[in-house]
Amino acid sequence: MAVIGKDEARRALAARLDTDAAVLVELAGDYDALTRRSVATNPHAPAAALEELAGDPEPNVRVGVAGNAATPPALLERLASDPIEQVRERVAHHEAVPVDVLRKLAEDDDEGVRRVVASREDAPKTALRLLAADPEEWIRGFAAMNPAMPPDVLQRLVSDEEEDVGRAALRNPGVPACVLESLADDENENTRWDVAGNTSAPAGVLERLGYDEVMPVRAHVAANPATPTRTLKTLADDADEAVRCSVAANPAVPAETLAALVDDTSIDVRKRVAEAGGVLPHDVESLSRDSSPVVRASVAARADVTRDVLADLSGDKERTVRRHIAENELAQPRELAQLAHDADAYVRARVAANRAADAKTLEGLAADADTGVRRSVAGNTAAPAAALDMLASDADVYIRRSVAANPNASARALALLAADSDDAVRSAALANESFDAARLLDAAMIGNAPGTQPAGDAAPVVSPADEIRKLYELLEMGAITQGEFDAAKARLLALL
């Protein structure tokens, strides 16, 4: 077997989710910053390791701790005073950050940190009021968009000296209805457009704006899920197709209104009907026979389309339609097997990435002449080990990297990839939780494993010639094929 370097082994253990807590604590004190960074970002890192790494001299390590979901609130409070703004910004993003820490960060010197707090709906009202008066326009803009902003503050922000801030406040669903009512007839069409899209706008206001002379205003009413049903029905007959498109895309539009748009003269309108969540099954079936491939492709992409419709569309003459069938996980294995032989490489690549494809189909695509198709198989977490074994010796480095990271990769494939000439391939193989953890512990000199050197000793230096010899041993054992040996040998010879 190929010799694993000490540093590689320790980095891999630091990143793995199945690494023992005691090992992670030891690795938190490693001399290598990349190893410590991996521990810092590991969601299974114990509190003792995170506590040590929160004081790490490397900023990137502390950034990792600040963004780790496992970091306790007390440690986040400590990192909120870190001299590096990226660390404080990660703290501001953290779901477990204490409320009083958010209040403190609302006054941070860094604009990026304040922007994060301004966007948080769980930020304390005192922080939001403070940020609504921030000297930076764009910070006030983010604060104005926050649904948790108190209504009285939003009413003030609507009149902000900067137009963009005022418009952001006017689009906020928390703005008082009386403000929306008063501005519904404003001479500025941008103001009316903002009111038309606000989900808190009174029904009477939306009905009135549904007859606005400016098309974008009517289209915004048509897209508003709070718009009354009768107004949507009226707008479905609007002369402008952009308005009808907005009606079709409205998540609250009734099925009967969608049904009236199934035969619309506009392809864009019919496409949006084909994508709509509320469209009735028989209307979906009708749209699957639409004259436009754009519409049929939208039907093929639906997450609730019937298997009969998918089967009918799998033989569509338009490759755009077949591509959408190929990536739909509702497609039957037999249709995917048929599409695996499609002349269009993009169709085959989408089949190769589809978790619904059967093992035989994916094994066949692992030998496809197109690199993109093979890459899709390599990254498919439903790909069988046999397909990944084939791809472990592929000439394309990105394919080998994907195989190395695939949880279905076999021990044989990972052994081959752990000796790869590409650093990223080796790292991914070693970090794969299917790789033998005992070998990593031994190579990392952790746990007093037999034959390990003292922790201070240098990691073994392995030449390409040594690795070729090890690969030959794998070949003799039957662990790899002749083809895999030849491909790996060629890559290693290039390093000599």
Image (spheres, rainbow, N blue to C red):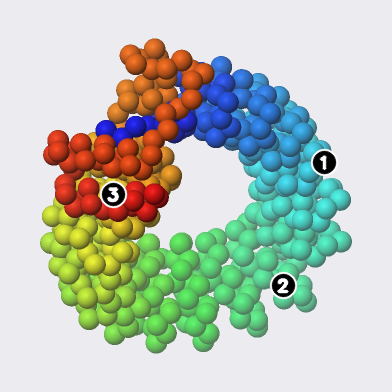
- The answer to whether 277 is drawn above or below residue 108 in the figure is below
Q: Amino acid at mark 1?
A: Asp
Residue annotated with mark 2? 190
**Residue 208 appears at what percent x and percent y?**
63, 73
Q: Amino acid at mark 3?
A: Ala
**Residue 464 appears at what percent x and percent y?**
36, 43
Residue annotated with mark 1? 109
Q: Between residue 297 and residue 44, name the one nearer to us.
A: 44
Residue 124 in sight here: no
Q: Are marks 2 and 1 in contact (CB under 8 Å)?
A: no
Query: Residue at (34%, 58%) from the top-left corner?
Result: 396
Q: CA distance from mark 3 to mark 1?
A: 53 Å
Query: Residue at (39%, 87%) from the top-left corner?
Result: 265
**Residue 40 appears at what percent x and percent y?**
55, 30
Say which element carries label 2. Answer: helix
Query: Residue at (69%, 41%) from the top-left corner?
Result: 86
Q: Nearer the viewer, mark 2 or mark 1?
A: 1
Residue annotated with mark 3? 488
Q: CA distance from mark 3 to mark 2?
A: 63 Å
**Residue 458 appears at what percent x and percent y?**
48, 25
Q: Quadrant of residue 366?
A: bottom left
- The answer to whether 383 is drawn above or below residue 228 in the figure is above
Left or right: 66 as drawn, with respect to 107: left
